């Protein structure tokens, strides 16, 4: 929640610290220790998140035609335990842990991307990247299914549907279709929007994938909006910077 300088960053083979917060691999579990202050309305955010992978993955895919941006799910099938004392809350459920890296700003090759992750009935996880590129390049669509035992398969994705715009009028789309079987076609819907900003939205979406009706974690990123001078000027108020 705070951008910090290199003097506040420490790393070993199993532990990574940024200021007062840290994450650590131990006994096959990722423990995330948070001790932050929310912004712009200050309040303490302090607690522990434990991610227990049901299997690890070394799958990596390029998000752009040039291969300068890459995505890899480290633990696509996992469980999570959340325990916070500020604010006071505790819950557990299915989880997902991945990595993104790039050799240039996201605004260079992309205009927008819609991402979605959904657990399926057999314990597998489907991840969808629906990327719109700049410079006249075709959309890049990645649909992949992961099983806890490490099996990976490409998914034939249904058609793209438009979702309602966010409060900031950010356009967002989702893949949705019956996919065979006895499932009847149904329009996708936003169950709840969890984060709504001028350039980014995260939501819970009900849709249809792989012949199942699922509730998926969904995000939309407008790289064009993110790069605009107005948004860049607002970022320090949302995410403060500390040396």
Image (cartoon, grey):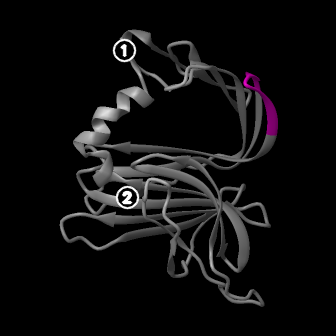
The magenta stretch is 84-91
Q: Is 214 rendered above or below residue 149? A: below
| Residue drawn at x 78%, y 90% as measured from the top left | 182
Count of numbered tags: 2
Location of the C terminus by quadrant is top left
How far from the left and from the top, in percent, is residue 44? 63, 18
The residue tagged with tag 1: helix, strand or loop? helix
| Residue drawn at x 74%, y 27% as measured from the top left | 27
- In the picture of the structure, the residue carrying the numbered disc 2 is 63
Is 220 situated left or right of 210 in this image?
left
The residue tagged with tag 2: helix, strand or loop? loop
Rate crowding at label 2 as few (under 14), some (14 to 19) or many (20 or more) other CA atoms within 10 Å.
Answer: many
Is 61 situated left or right of 13 in this image?
left
Q: Is 56 rendered above or below residue 27? A: below
Q: Is 174 rendered above or below residue 211? A: above
How far apart, in angstroms, are the residues tagged by discs 1 and 2? 28 Å
Our reading of the magenta stretch's main secondary structure is: strand
| Residue drawn at x 71%, y 24% as measured from the top left | 48
- In the picture of the structure, the residue carrying the numbered disc 1 is 6
Location of residue 192 by image quarter: bottom right
Identify which residue, 207 or 15, lies in the foreground: 207
Q: Is 3 rendered above or below residue 227? A: above
Disc with the residue nearer the chain's start (1 vs 2): 1
Is 235 situated left or right of 105 in this image?
right
């Amino acid at each position: 929640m705070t951008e910090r300088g290199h003097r506040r960053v420490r790393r070993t083979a199993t532990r990574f610290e940024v200021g007062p917060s840290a994450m650590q691999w131990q006994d096959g579990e990722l423990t995330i220790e948070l001790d932050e202050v929310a912004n712009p309305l200050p309040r303490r955010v302090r607690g522990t998140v434990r991610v227990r992978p049901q299997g690890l993955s070394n799958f990596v895919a390029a998000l752009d035609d040039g291969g300068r941006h890459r995505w890899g799910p480290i633990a696509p099938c996992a469980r999570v335990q959340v325990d916070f004392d500020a604010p006071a809350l505790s819950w557990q459920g299915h989880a997902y842990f991945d990595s993104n890296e790039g050799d240039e700003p996201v605004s260079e090759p992309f205009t927008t991307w819609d991402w979605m992750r959904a657990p399926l009935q057999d314990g597998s996880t489907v991840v969808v990247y629906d990327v719109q590129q700049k410079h006249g390049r075709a959309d890049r669509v990645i649909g992949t299914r992961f099983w806890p035992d490490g099996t990976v398969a490409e998914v034939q994705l249904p058609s793209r549907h438009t979702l309602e715009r966010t409060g900031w009028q950010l356009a967002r789309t989702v893949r949705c279709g019956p996919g065979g079987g006895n499932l009847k076609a149904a329009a996708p819907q936003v169950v709840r929007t969890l984060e709504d900003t001028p350039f980014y939205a995260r939501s819970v979406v009900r849709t249809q994938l792989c012949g199942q009706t699922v509730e998926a974690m969904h995000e939309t990123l407008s790289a064009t909006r993110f790069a605009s001078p107005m948004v860049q000027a607002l970022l320090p108020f949302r995410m403060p910077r500390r040396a």
